[in-house]
Image: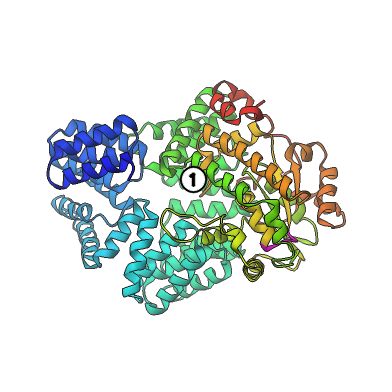
């Protein structure tokens, strides 16, 4: 046990014994070492409340909300403080946030039921009571699993849940929770199997079926997800929930006309629903119908001015210029107290982009920094852990390993991996190559990352990957490669080759080479300052946690270059490096270079990539629908006075 863990355990024992003074003392000792220690802040807040030091408790909670903005128990504590002070509406709001972030908090549901009833809101009180009764009826083990899950203790949640399921193998709620854990860990095939099995045991459980659809979509099994959504829709075609789900799955599977018809049906039942208008805007954007997408986003904002998702969607078009009144509206919203976490994040990034377009760079940087700080607190990303992970790849993946494993794996030459960092120009390379008659463009496929997760093993705190790579037998390598080819087939057309554009695959080139030795690999590289600052400005739908800090993204880029140098040394000639700046300077020359590497003849369509009709789902969707341009080059330079942390992290790679 570390000194921190020992002090934390001491504080917990004191609190359980009712010695809140001692508990507070231990918590404050921890905070003197790390002022953002979330567990210590929580215990300090609880102890202060029991000691009737409400102002101190509130200060600890304010710090805790900053350090862990989606920690449900922190909002439950805020509810307790407000309720004790007689501020019932403030307490209701705090308890509401608590159960949003952690639905297993019985005390919050109980308080909500009492407060809503006292306020004369019978419907809300009844709903809270129903949730409380559902929790009380659940096995205590599963309530604990749910708490661990929603508080980020995924390994512990998995251990408890698996132990419970060994004794209760057909418990559908246990299976559903274990699937949710699998999704959070990226083990999507397990999640899919669990939810499919649970749905078979309990076919009328709507939440199970919705979760199953979600797992299928995450695995990018879009047709299967759509079939499940069709089955729900057939049960009740008038349900806006089922209409909306089928619209989204139709969009993902490429049937945009059906999606638009269903979105319109939802809007007929729920006029001006901002979430539906925003989803419709996303579909229009994916199809390249930008003017209509803008209209849909703006309609969502008109219906709900604080709908942050729509504000950010406009900014994320990269080509939209905000009007004066829109700029003022975003500023006004951000000044409102109690703004929900993701609304503040969305508005911060959107306002930063609007100010950047107006060349108000200092204020723009302030808002980019605020949005990134919020996301960094949420993700709890560790640059040290990532550096260690990449160092382990170098230690394990040696020339001797590859010599020993030569001739093994699955022989398919089909995959073309385009990898590197996000915002490095990979979407442009994909669009160029996918315009070739013999290459299918697909998506950022999760399959390699999922395999790496599986190889890590399930023992708490111990990862077997990449150390397990030398232990894999020839049969294992062939089987993993064959499974990758089979599982990705649903994303392909009839072309003999296809692109997997997951950028993070650069961390797993050793694994890729072992299971698919004939696959081609292209490293999409962009100048460090341009690439890193572009990532810092981007709010990603999920993943890419290293982008939410200048130091973090600078270190990641430096580690990436170091690891790619390692791959070049141990697998000479395996990876083709394509620099974004070279593509801008000589599109035809770099296109021919890529096609020569792939062994394919040149086709003029590759130079007319912006005319290729295909759905593009990344943040660069609008840029790749235009001819080659330099709009993003040197975009960091106006922000140079505030980028010292990035340059320091990049070290010798900085200009």
**Residue stretch in magenta:** 515-519
Q: Residue furthest top?
A: 641
Residue at x-position 48% and y-position 27%: 366
Q: Secondary structure under badge 1?
A: helix
Q: Answer left or right for 302 relative to 115.
A: right
- Residue closest to the eye, 474 or 487: 474
Q: Is the C terminus in the top left, top right, bottom left or bottom right quadrant?
A: top right
Residue 115 screen position, x and y as percent:
16, 50
Which residue is disc 1 drawn over? 310
Q: Residue 460 lies in what quarter of the image? A: bottom left
Residue 564 screen position, x and y as percent:
68, 44
Residue 137 screen position, x and y as percent:
22, 68
Q: Residue 141 lies in what quarter of the image? A: bottom left
> Is residue 653 inside the magenta stretch?
no
Q: Answer left or right for 538 relative to 6.
A: right
Q: Magenta stretch mostly in which secondary structure?
A: loop
Residue at x-position 32% and y-position 60%: 145
Q: How is the image coloured?
A: rainbow
């Amino acid at each position: 046990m570390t000194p921190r863990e020992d002090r934390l355990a001491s504080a917990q024992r004191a609190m359980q014994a009712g010695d809140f003074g001692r508990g507070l003392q231990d918590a404050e000792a921890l905070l003197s070492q790390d002022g953002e220690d979330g567990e210590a802040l929580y215990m300090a807040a609880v102890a202060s409340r029991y000691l009737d030091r409400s102002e101190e408790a509130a200060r600890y909670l304010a710090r805790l909300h900053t350090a862990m903005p989606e920690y449900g128990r922190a909002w439950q504590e805020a509810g307790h403080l407000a309720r004790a002070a007689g501020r019932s509406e403030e307490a209701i709001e705090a308890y509401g946030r608590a159960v949003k972030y952690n639905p297993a908090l019985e005390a919050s549901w109980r308080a909500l039921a009492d407060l809503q009833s006292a306020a004369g809101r019978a419907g809300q009180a009844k709903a809270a009571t129903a949730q409380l009764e559902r929790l009380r009826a659940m096995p205590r083990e599963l309530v604990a699993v749910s708490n661990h899950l929603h508080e980020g203790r995924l390994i512990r949640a998995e251990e408890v849940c698996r132990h419970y399921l060994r004794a209760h193998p057909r418990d559908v709620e246990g299976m559903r929770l274990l699937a949710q854990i699998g999704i959070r860990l990226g083990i999507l095939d397990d999640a899919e199997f669990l939810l499919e099995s649970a749905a078979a045991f309990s076919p009328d459980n709507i939440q199970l079926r919705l979760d199953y659809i979600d797992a299928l979509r995450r695995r990018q099994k879009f047709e299967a997800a759509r079939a499940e959504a069709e089955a729900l829709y057939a049960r009740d075609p008038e349900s806006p929930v089922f209409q909306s789900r089928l619209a989204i799955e139709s969009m993902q599977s490429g049937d945009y006309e059906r999606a638009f018809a269903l979105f319109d049906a939802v809007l007929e039942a729920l006029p001006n629903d901002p979430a539906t208008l925003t989803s419709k805007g996303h579909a229009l954007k994916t199809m390249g119908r930008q003017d209509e997408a803008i209209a849909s986003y703006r309609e969502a904002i008109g219906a709900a001015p604080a709908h942050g998702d729509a504000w950010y969607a406009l900014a994320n078009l990269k080509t939209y210029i905000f009007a004066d009144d829109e700029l003022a509206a975003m500023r006004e919203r951000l000044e409102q107290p109690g703004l929900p976490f993701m609304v503040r994040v969305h508005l911060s990034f959107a306002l930063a982009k609007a100010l950047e377009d107006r060349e108000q760079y200092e204020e723009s940087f302030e808002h980019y920094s605020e949005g990134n700080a919020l996301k960094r607190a949420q993700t709890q990303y560790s640059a040290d852990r990532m550096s260690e992970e990449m160092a382990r790849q170098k230690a394990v993946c040696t020339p001797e390993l590859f010599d020993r494993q030569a001739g093994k794996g699955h022989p398919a030459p089909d995959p073309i991996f385009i990898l590197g960092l996000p915002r490095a120009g990979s979407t442009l390379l994909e669009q160029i190559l996918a315009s070739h008659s013999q290459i299918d463009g697909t998506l950022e496929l999760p399959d390699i990352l999922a395999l790496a997760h599986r190889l890590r093993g399930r023992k708490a705190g111990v990862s077997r990957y990449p150390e397990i790579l030398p232990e894999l037998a020839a049969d294992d390598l062939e089987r993993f490669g064959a499974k990758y080819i089979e599982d990705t087939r649903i994303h392909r057309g009839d072309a003999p080759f296809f692109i997997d554009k997951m950028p993070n695959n650069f961390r797993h080139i050793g694994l890729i080479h072992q299971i698919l030795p004939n696959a081609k690999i292209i490293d999409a590289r962009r100048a460090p300052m341009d690439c890193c600052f572009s990532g810092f400005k981007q709010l990603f739908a999920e993943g890419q946690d290293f982008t939410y800090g200048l130091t973090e993204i600078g270190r990641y880029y430096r580690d990436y270059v170091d690891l790619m140098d390692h791959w070049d040394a141990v697998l000479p000639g395996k990876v083709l490096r394509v620099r974004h700046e070279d593509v801008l300077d000589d599109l035809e020359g770099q296109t021919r270079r890529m096609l020569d590497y792939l062994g394919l003849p040149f086709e003029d369509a590759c130079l007319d990539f912006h005319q290729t009709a295909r759905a593009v789902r990344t943040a660069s969707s609008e840029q790749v629908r235009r001819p080659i341009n330099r709009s993003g080059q040197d975009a960091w330079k106006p922000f140079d006075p505030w980028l010292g942390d990035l340059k320091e992290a990049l070290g010798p790679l900085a200009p």
